[in-house]
Amino acid sequence: MQEKDIEKKLRIGIKGIGGLCLKWVSPGYTGVPDRMILLPGGIIRFAELKAPGKTERKRQIVVQRILRHMGFIVYNSVDSVDKVQHIVAECKEVIQHNE
């Protein structure tokens, strides 16, 4: 399965629970995660998607560490449908908890 297929499944899954899964591009600041997940209640999470077997570059790892240090949740190496389903289920639980 290609990264774009995994990305599409995540986008559709998050939309299905009432959130947005936006492509995140930050000119001038490399290594940001691929997707910003916006959930009802002002909750923001990030996801770095990869084709199966691929890993993050060093700069991506550094940026993930910075985001986590700031208190954000970052899903790394999202490379399978199982991981996408886990993220969607976790986000759904967070939404329900905050209602």
Image: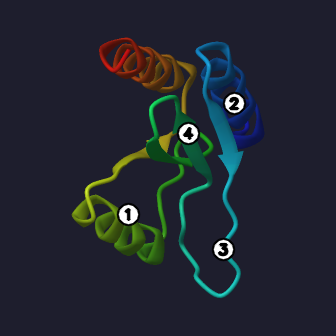
- Residue at left 29%, top 66%? 65
Q: Mark 1 vs mark 2: which is more N-terminal?
A: 2
Q: How far apart are marks 3 and 4 (CA)?
A: 17 Å
Which numbered dot is residue 38?
Answer: 4
Q: Quadrant of residue 64?
A: bottom left
Reading the image, the residue beneath label 2 is 11
Looking at the picture, which amino acid does disc 4 mark?
Leu
Q: Which of the two discs, 3 and 4, sits closer to the camera?
A: 4
Label total for image: 4
Reading the image, the residue beneath label 1 is 64
Q: Distance between the residues labelled 4 and 2?
A: 11 Å
- Residue at left 38%, top 14%? 99
Q: Mark 3 vs mark 2: which is more N-terminal?
A: 2
Looking at the picture, which amino acid does disc 2 mark?
Arg
Reading the image, the residue beneath label 3 is 26
Q: Which of the two discs, 4 and 2, sits closer to the camera?
A: 4
